[in-house]
Every structure is written in C-alpha cells, then in structure tokens.
C-alpha cells in the first residue's frame, strides 16, 4: 500500500495529515497509525489526522485523529489548526474568503468547531464550551454532578491539588511552584492511568507567571510529553479562572511556543489562537 501524507506542526505538536476526503472511514487502521508515528521506525508524529467528508449539515469536513499509541481522542486543538492549514493548502475554498479571513466548520467527536485563518498565518479556533461536571470529564474524584475544582489527588507519593476540565477530551490541571522541576516521565503516566480517570487523562502542570501569563508542561493521554496541547491550554485557562489565579484572557507559554486563549465572558466559549505550519510532504 502506498500512502500520500503531509506532516504539519502547531508549536511542535506534530501530525501526519491524510487526505481522506473520498472515503468516510480512515484509510489506515489505528495500529498502522501507531507505526507511522514511531520516531525511529516510522515518519514520527504525535498523531495521525484524517480529513474526512462532512456528515453534518453546515460543516465542511470531519476530523478524526489517532494518538501515537493508536487510541482515538475526541478532539485536538493544535491538530485542528493544522487540518485547517492542510485544507487551505489543498485548495479547499474557505467561507467568507471575500472578507480576507476564511473560515472552515469542522465536525469532530467533540462537536463542530469554527476555524478562522488569519492573514498573519495564525488560526483562531472557536473551541466551544468547557465541560466541568465530574461525569463529563469523566472522573470519579467527586460525585457525578459535582465539579472537581481544587481537589486533592495522591500521585507518585505526593498530594496534588487538581482541577478537571473537559474540552471534549479529559484534562487534569495542577498548579505548581516550579514547572521545570516536575519529572514528567515519572508522574505523567501515573496521572494518565490513575483509576479516578476511567478514560485516562491528559495532565497539565502549570506555573503562574502573572494573571495573563501561565507556563505549562503537558503529559498527553496516548502521546506522552508533547511540546504543546491546545485543548490542554484551554482547559488550563478555565482552571486558572475557576481557582482565581488568572484573567479570562492569557498567554499560555508551552515548550513549543505561546498560545493565546480567551474564555469569553459573553458567550462562555473558549477561543484559541496559534500557528500551524507545513513541514514536508511524502509518500510511504
Ligand atoms: N495535542 C492535542 C490533544 C490530542 C489528544 C490527546 N492526546 C487526548 O488523548 O485527549 C491538542 O492540541 O489538543
């Protein structure tokens, strides 16, 4: 089998993009995706993203993604920016292109996202509403109808205060004094596979630099330590606001660079702005 692909990255969170517009089912299996993501024996990536035909009214395309461990997450913030850039590079016309900023509406397992391609190359994504009930994360840290905000969780012999937010996918956020001191490779997998998270979790370790500047490191479910996580940055801003640590708009500084996140007061939705760049195309 020969597969055409293009590699994209958003702040170093990197993906293999596949033009799957002719078929509603991904053209490779999760285990083939895992092989392609291998950084030694494959192309190397944090995940594989498929541009699939739309199935819902008023949407342009459908995104599905496999993590590098072959699991399928509901949503990916950096990945969907890369998908918008991929569609544009394929010559797919945007909506409202006469205004100078084009839009795509992309269906995901977490709902429909609207993406705006800006003239400076950045992409803004309407990431929708955060979900806060324990049953929505999901986590058993609290009763199903309660919010897990600043609750203690014992991991790796230490008690961490955590806040849980779903952006369609699960996030556990913990604020620390010094984010560089966290041994991600040791504590990350223990958070990810903790029994209080029945669908596993992404985990964000956050240092507050100022009310509009947070520094983040992430351990992703199904991908491990990555250079950036868009859904994680959105979940982090929500956790920071809920715990009184930051304003509703902030720069989230990641190892791969900054994301600008806003939690709109007027509509309650999260807006994420950041880059998405093509790296190379190939055939495997
Ligand atoms: N890097 C992504 C998140 C990808 C999915 C995640 N690993 C999960 O399993 O939920 C982002 O930018 O949001």
Image: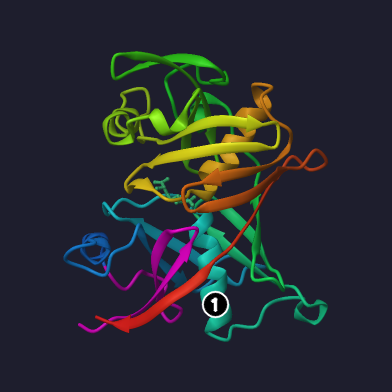
Quadrant hosting residue 103: bottom right
Would residue 128 be counted in the magenta stretch? no
Q: Identify which residue is drawn at 31% across, 28% down.
A: 187
Q: Identify which residue is drawn at 62% across, 68% down.
A: 59
Is the CB of mark 1 within 8 Å of ligand 1?
no
Would residue 25 be counted in the magenta stretch? yes
Q: Identify which residue is drawn at 29% across, 28% down.
A: 190
The total of numbered circles placed on residues is 1
Q: Is residue 158 toward the left or the right of residue 256 in the image?
A: left
Crowd band around label 1 with a 10 angstrom C-alpha radius: few (<14), some (14–19), many (20+)? some
Q: Nearer the viewer, residue 120 or 261?
A: 120
The quarter of the rendered structure image containing the C terminus is: bottom left
Magenta stretch bounds: 1-28
**Rendered location of residue 99, percent (x, y):** 82, 77
**Rendered location of residue 276, percent (x, y):** 54, 66
Q: Going by the picture, which residue comes out furthest to the left?
A: 41
Q: Nearer the viewer, residue 203 or 216?
A: 216
Mark 1, residue position? 87
**Rendered location of residue 225, percent (x, y):** 35, 44
Numbered disc 1: secondary structure: helix
**Rendered location of residue 211, percent (x, y):** 70, 31
Quadrant hosting residue 154: top left
Q: Is residue 267 toward the left or the right of residue 30 in the image?
A: right
Residue 84 vertical placement versus 13 (above, below) = below
Quadrant hosting residue 182: top left
Residue 220 vertical placement versus 241 (above, below) = below
Q: Is residue 232 toward the left or the right of residue 44 in the image?
A: right
Name the colour scheme.
rainbow
Residue 90 vertical placement versus 68 (above, below) = below
The quarter of the rendered structure image containing the N terminus is: bottom left
């Amino acid at each position: 089998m020969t597969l055409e692909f293009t590699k994209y990255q958003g702040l170093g969170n990197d993906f293999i993009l596949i033009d799957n517009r002719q078929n509603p089912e991904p053209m490779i299996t999760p285990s083939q995706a895992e092989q392609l993501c291998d950084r030694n024996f494959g192309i190397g990536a944090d995940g594989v993203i498929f541009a699939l035909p739309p199935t819902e009214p008023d949407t342009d395309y459908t995104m599905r993604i496999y993590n590098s461990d072959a699991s399928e997450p509901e949503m990916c913030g950096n990945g969907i920016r890369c998908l918008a850039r991929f569609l544009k590079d394929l010559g797919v016309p945007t909506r409202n292109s006469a205004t100078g900023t084009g839009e795509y509406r992309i269906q995901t397992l977490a709902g429909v996202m609207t993406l705006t391609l800006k003239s400076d190359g950045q992409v803004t994504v309407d990431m929708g509403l955060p979900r806060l009930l324990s049953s929505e994360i999901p986590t058993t840290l609290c009763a199903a109808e309660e919010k897990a905000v600043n609750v203690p969780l014992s991991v790796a012999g230490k008690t961490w205060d955590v806040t849980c937010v779903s952006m369609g996918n699960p996030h556990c956020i913990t604020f620390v004094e010094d984010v560089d001191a966290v041994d991600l490779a040791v504590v990350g997998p223990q958070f990810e596979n903790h029994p209080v998270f029945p669908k596993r979790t992404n985990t964000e370790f956050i240092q507050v630099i100022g009310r509009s500047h947070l520094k983040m490191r992430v351990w992703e479910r199904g991908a491990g330590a990555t250079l950036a996580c868009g859904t994680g940055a959105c979940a982090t801003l929500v956790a920071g606001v809920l715990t009184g640590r930051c304003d509703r708009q902030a720069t989230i500084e990641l190892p791969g660079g900054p994301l600008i996140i806003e939690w709109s007061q007027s509509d309650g939705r999260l807006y994420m702005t950041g880059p998405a760049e093509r790296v190379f195309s190939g055939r495997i």
